[in-house]
Image: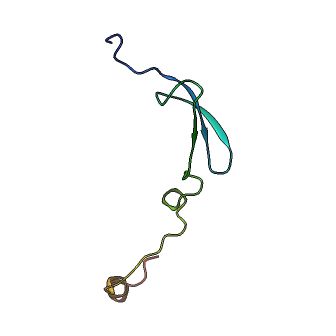
Amino acid sequence: MKKNIHPEYHEITVVMTNGEEIKTRSVYGKPGDVINLDIDPLTHPAWTGTGQKLVDTAGQISKFSKRYGDLS
């Protein structure tokens, strides 16, 4: 490994939206820095699976269901 080209790897604190603090190691900032998250895996629909709505504008789901039946 080459010397003096790699960033310093140190401990930082990540604060989730609910106030929970997680200590982790990162190359972000300086040792002891804090990252406050606006969006995190505990609340974002991409990770929780809530709030997703299927929009069927062309009737494709209805056509599929009529042809093949309800597969759920």
Percent across and percent down for residue 18 are 67, 51
Residue drawn at point x = 66 percent, y = 39 percent: 21
Query: In this view of the protein, which residue sits in the foreground, 3 or 60?
Result: 3
How many marks are shown on the rendered structure?
A: 0
Q: Is residue 34 left or right of residue 46?
A: right
Query: In this view of the protein, which residue sits in the foreground, 60 or 34?
Result: 34
Q: Is residue 22 left or right of residue 68?
A: right
Colour theme: rainbow
Query: In this view of the protein, which residue sits in the foreground, 1 or 67?
Result: 1
Residue drawn at point x = 34 percent, y = 10 percent: 3
Residue drawn at point x = 56 percent, y = 23 percent: 31
Question: Farthest residue toward the right?
Answer: 19
Question: Farthest residue toward the top?
Answer: 3
Percent across and percent down for residue 41 are 55, 51
Percent across and percent down for residue 24 are 57, 31
Query: In this view of the protein, which residue sits in the foreground, 8 or 22?
Result: 8
Please say if 49 is above or below 58.
above
Please say if 44 is above or below 34.
below
Percent across and percent down for residue 64 are 33, 83
Residue drawn at point x = 55 percent, y = 51 percent: 40
Dividing the picture into quarters, in which one does residue 36 lie? Answer: top right
Quarter of the picture containing the N terminus is top left
